Amino acid sequence: MRKKLIAANWKMYKTPEQTAAFFREFLPLVAAHTRDEIVVCPPYIDLQTAVAAAEGSNVAVGAQNVHWEKEGAFTGEISATMLTSLGVTHVIIGHSERRQYFNETDDTVNRKLEIALENGLTPILCVGEVLEEREAGLTEDVLRRQCMRAFNGISARKAAKLVLAYEPVWAIGTGKTATPQMASDAHQVIRHEAEKAFGKEFAEGLRILYGGSVKPENATVLMAEAEIDGALVGGASLDPASFTKIVKY
Ligand code: PEP
């Protein structure tokens, strides 16, 4: 049985004050919730506030990005050790907005995955096709390529903490959701790639989240799917009540 993971991706929303206010309201709402793992990924500047607020609770804190080098002359970047030194435990890698707007490539995703795993972070690796690729029948090819390149050179032992997120780009922030069947099919492709790279046992234990306009209204149906091991939630995670409803799908 894979324990589901429900993760919030706040993108570029909320100040430290707003982060503290979110946690004040959110933590009591989910305090008794043990069925699923809960992770909140705020912007970098909110991480310290979030970690302090979540201390001793059932909510973990993740970053939305990490640099692939240990340290160096990389103005504006943040390293894996900087994240762990704050008490951050998770990191989103390869989100489609970073691939689309910030030149994230399969190669940088691979390097970020390596450094995150090396430092004991739990990476939430995002893969997914754009609309043109789905319409051209290329979804499987895209998912296979993104997974294969991301996993390149990483051993099953090293990848132990890895979590995947299938995020069809056409469903992110658009209000369009993949059907449970579409998500399930994509998850099977991803699981198969994980099996090729890391073996059958690893693939069977691998958690694959679905992301793309998950809302309180559709969370129950999506989470009922055997292949869906949780959710990566953008817009609907910004409000404590709405995110709680998703956590408690
Ligand atoms: C995301 O940012 O990963 C995401 C899935 O966003 P939304 O839920 O808003 O579609």
Image (cartoon, helix red, strand yellow):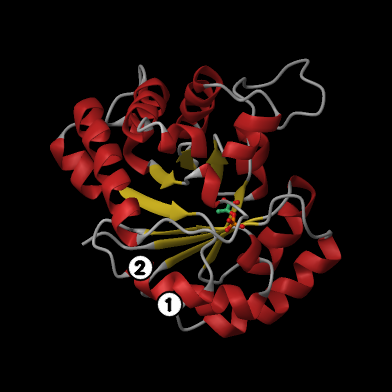
17 left or right of 210 in image: right
For ligand 1, tell me if the residue under mark 2 lies within 8 Å: no
Please state which amino acid type lies under the numbered disc 2. Answer: Met
Viewport quadrant of the N terminus: bottom left
Label tally: 2
Q: Residues within 10 Å of mark 2 (few under 14, many from 20)?
A: some
Q: Which residue is drawn at 65% across and 62% down?
A: 235
Reading the image, the residue beneath label 2 is 223
Q: Quadrant of ligand 1?
A: bottom right
**149 and 122: which is toward the camera:** 149
Mark 1 and mark 2 lie on one chain; the one further toward the N terminus is 2
Please state which amino acid type lies under the numbered disc 1. Answer: Tyr
Residue 107 percent coordinates (x, y)? 51, 17
Callouts 1 and 2 close, C-beta under 8 Å:
yes
Residue 193 percent coordinates (x, y)? 26, 31
Q: How crowded is mark 1: few (under 14 residues within 10 Å), some or many (20 or more)?
A: some
74 left or right of 69 in image: right
Residue 181 higher or lower than 110, as above or below: below
Reading the image, the residue beneath label 1 is 249
**31 and 100: which is toward the camera:** 100
Quadrant of res 64? top right
